[in-house]
């Protein structure tokens, strides 16, 4: 029998899988939001496409859906939070970095159970993996850090 974590009553193995599934959810949500921002397709259409065509077995699908629907639902508010922290107009942001910042801002504002450091770390990982510029992760880190300080 697997050892149970004393505080939450789940196996240590199951406890480790959850953050990884959320990481994959953030990656898929970023890809879907990027597609939405560039192509302007309906979110429901993008959702159906991702669920049918993308490998989702390791993804926390509920969290993917939360981000995919939550970010566009609060887009104006998120951009208002982000804009004053930028060194350029929000329209000049690379679409990937913009989507990462929107997701991070959404998590900081509406997913209070997610530690702010996790939001920043995940945003940095996404920028390193998908960002257009080699140093974009530093920019994402700086903006998300400022957002986190505002939310605390």
Image (spheres, rainbow, N blue to C red):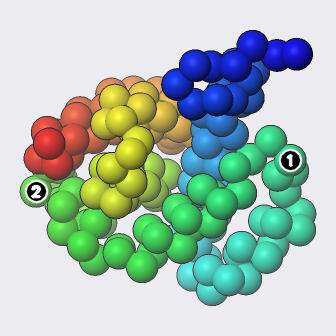
Q: Residue at x 62, y 80 (%)?
A: 43
Locate residue 45, reporting x and y percent.
73, 83
Q: Which is in the foreground here, disc 1 or disc 2?
A: 1
Q: Quadrant of residue 63?
A: bottom right
Q: Is residue 50 left or right of residue 38?
A: right
Question: Residue 57 shows which numbered tag?
Answer: 1
The disc placed on residue 148 is none
- Quarter of the figure with residue 98: bottom left
Q: Report the label total.
A: 2
Q: Is residue 124 left or right of residue 90?
A: right
Q: What residue is disc 2 on?
A: 84
Left or right relative to 25: residue 103: left
Q: Secondary structure at mark 1?
A: loop
The residue positioned 55% from the left and 65% from the top of the image is: 66
Horizontal side, residue 148 vs residue 34: left or right: left
Write the residue at 44% across / 49% down. Answer: 100
Of residue 149 and residue 36, the one placed in the foreground of this image is: 149
Q: x and y percent of residue 109 in the render?
A: 28, 57
Return the x and y of residue 116 as percentages of the image width and height: 31, 36
**Does the image show residue 94?**
no
Q: Marks 1 and 2, Cα distance to the nearest angstrom?
A: 38 Å
For the residue carrying disc 2, how many other residues have a C-alpha within 10 Å: few (<14), some (14-19), or many (20+)? few
């Amino acid at each position: 029998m697997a050892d149970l974590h004393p505080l939450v009553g789940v196996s240590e193995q199951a406890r480790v899988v959850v953050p990884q599934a959320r990481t994959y959810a953030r990656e898929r949500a970023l890809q879907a939001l990027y597609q939405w921002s560039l192509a302007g397709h309906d979110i429901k259409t993008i959702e159906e496409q991702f669920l049918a065509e993308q490998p989702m077995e390791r993804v926390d699908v509920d969290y993917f859906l939360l981000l995919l629907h939550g970010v566009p639902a609060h887009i104006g508010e998120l951009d208002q939070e982000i804009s004053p922290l930028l060194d350029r107009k929000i329209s000049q942001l690379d679409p990937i970095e913009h989507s990462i910042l929107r997701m991070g801002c959404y998590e900081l504002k509406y997913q209070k159970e997610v530690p702010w450091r996790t939001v920043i770390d995940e945003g940095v990982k996404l920028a390193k993996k998908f960002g257009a510029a080699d140093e974009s992760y530093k920019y994402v880190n700086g903006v998300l850090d400022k957002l986190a300080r505002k939310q605390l």
